[in-house]
């Protein structure tokens, strides 16, 4: 009986979390524009297009570094993490970077979505970090850090 009760409680919590995650997913997917940026131009580091769980191209440095990334939601912490998976295209500056040494298990950025109901999110940019030297961080893309609003608001 205790096991059955435990399973029921687990299912109830899982369902509640799924509903909450679903509400956030609907609100977060789409185009977000950095405060004081032009929403019609959306240059690299001015806008982000969040599609949770979907592999998509991401401009880190205009005409230099484009990566395939994935946005992953942690509904409990009200955070979305941006992970890179592969290189799409690099210019001469990006080609010199040690891509085989960058840690794909560490997020490029963390988005605080606790204010999503007010139409804003805040990005904390970590950048590329090496797996062989965790304290070594490449600041490429630091211009992404800041507050964003929904483009269609």
Image (cartoon, helix red, strand yellow):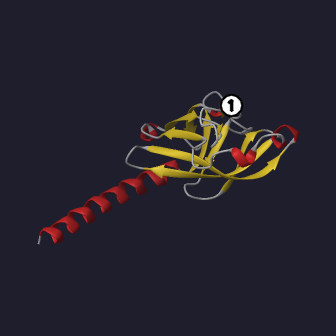
Relative horizontal placement of residue 21, taking residue 12 as reference (left or right): right
130 vs 88, nearest the viewer? 130
Q: Position of residue 114 (x, y in %)?
A: 42, 38
117 vs 105, nearest the viewer? 105
Q: Which residue is mark 1?
A: 139
Q: Is residue 68 above or below residue 113?
A: below
Residue at the image position 62 percent from the left and 49 percent from the top: 104
74 vs 44, nearest the viewer? 74
Question: Split into 4 quadrants, where in the image is the C terminus?
Answer: top right
Q: Is residue 121 above or below residue 58?
A: above
Dot 1 falls on a residue whose secondary structure is loop
Relative horizontal placement of residue 26, taking residue 103 as reference (left or right): left
Q: Quadrant of residue 16?
A: bottom left
Q: Is residue 118 above or below residue 50?
A: above
Question: Split into 4 quadrants, where in the image is the N terminus?
Answer: bottom left
54 vs 116, nearest the viewer? 54
Residue at the image position 22 percent from the left and 68 percent from the top: 7
Q: Position of residue 138 (x, y in %)?
A: 69, 33
Seen as rendered, the residue at the extreme top is: 36
Seen as rendered, the residue at the extreme right is: 92
Q: Position of residue 109 (x, y in %)?
A: 58, 40
Seen as rendered, the residue at the extreme left is: 1
């Amino acid at each position: 009986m205790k096991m059955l009760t435990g399973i029921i409680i687990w299912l109830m919590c899982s369902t509640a979390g799924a509903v909450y995650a679903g509400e956030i997913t609907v609100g977060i997917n789409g185009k977000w524009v950095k405060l004081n940026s032009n929403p019609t131009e959306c240059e690299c580091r001015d806008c982000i297009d969040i599609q949770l769980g979907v592999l998509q191209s991401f401009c880190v440095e205009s005409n230099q570094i484009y990566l395939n990334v994935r946005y992953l939601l942690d509904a409990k912490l009200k955070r979305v993490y941006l992970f890179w998976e592969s290189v799409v295209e690099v210019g001469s500056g990006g080609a010199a970077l040690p891509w085989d040494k960058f840690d794909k298990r560490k997020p490029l950025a963390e988005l605080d979505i606790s204010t999503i109901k007010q139409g804003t999110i805040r990005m904390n940019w970590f950048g590329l970090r090496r797996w062989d030297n965790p304290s070594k961080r490449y600041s490429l893309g630091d211009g992404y850090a800041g507050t964003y609003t929904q483009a269609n608001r």
